[in-house]
Amino acid sequence: MVEAINLKTGMIFEKDNKLIKVLETNHHKPGKGNTVMQMKLQDVRSSAIVQTTMRPTEKVELAIVDKKQAQYLYRQDKLLCFMDLETYEQYELPLEQVSAESKYLIPNLQVQLNFCGTELIGLDLPTIVDLKVTETEPNIKGATAASGGKPATLETGLVVTVPNFIQKDDVLTINTTNGTYKQRV
């Protein structure tokens, strides 16, 4: 059992026979009244997201999550296919269950699959991935690095703000935790 005040982003706990993933937490002390934890939570199975509050001392049962190294293979309709790197067993994960993570998936990318018992409940991405620019505005002459940048669409459909010197077909390193440009490869 863990108290709500100790829950961190990414943790998964069980409540009412549901697996709940913590997306955001905020310790809030209103002017009057008791301190509360404002949380953005996601039902792992249905992908429903809910905003809620919990008392800091409220206890929840953390789910036991096993991790396996796997390789992303391909997308077929609304299913993402992965292969276990040790047993070569293949797993399918519904796109809606990992819609945020899917913006960083390219074939052959190594990820960690998360299992609760025998149920596949999600995946963890590497911290950075290299993605190719498929569309961006042309280079602007005289633009400096201090300007705001421009949007670029990457091969997975992800749109990020990049410096003005970035061109189509450049390969960029992207931070998967916040979706930001790190560098050109």
Image: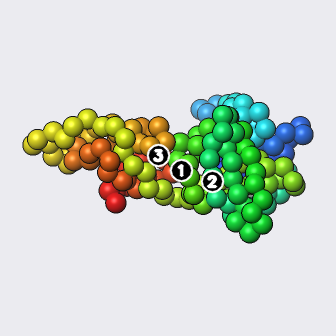
Tell me whether circle 2 and circle 3 mark residues in contact (CB < 8 Å).
no
**Residue at the image point whose x is 61% and y is 33% from the top:** 30
Residue 100 in sight in this render: yes
**Residue at the image point whose x is 34% and y is 57% from the top:** 183
Q: Which residue is most to the bottom?
A: 86
Label 1 Cα neighbours within 10 Å, binned few <14 / some 14-19 / many ≥20: some
165 horizontally vs 160: left or right? left
- Check the picture and name the quadrant holding the N terminus: bottom right
152 horizontally vs 120: left or right? left
Q: Secondary structure at mark 3?
A: loop
Residue 97 in sight in this render: no
Q: Nearer the viewer, residue 175 or 6?
A: 175
Point out the tag, 2 or 3, that comes first from the N-terminus. Answer: 2
Q: Secondary structure at mark 2?
A: strand
Q: Secondary structure at mark 1?
A: loop
Which residue is labeled 1 in the image? 106
Which residue is labeled 2 in the image? 72
Q: Whole-percent x and y of residue 11?
A: 71, 51
Point out the tag, 3 or 1, that comes first from the N-terminus. Answer: 1
Tell me whether circle 1 and circle 2 mark residues in contact (CB < 8 Å).
yes
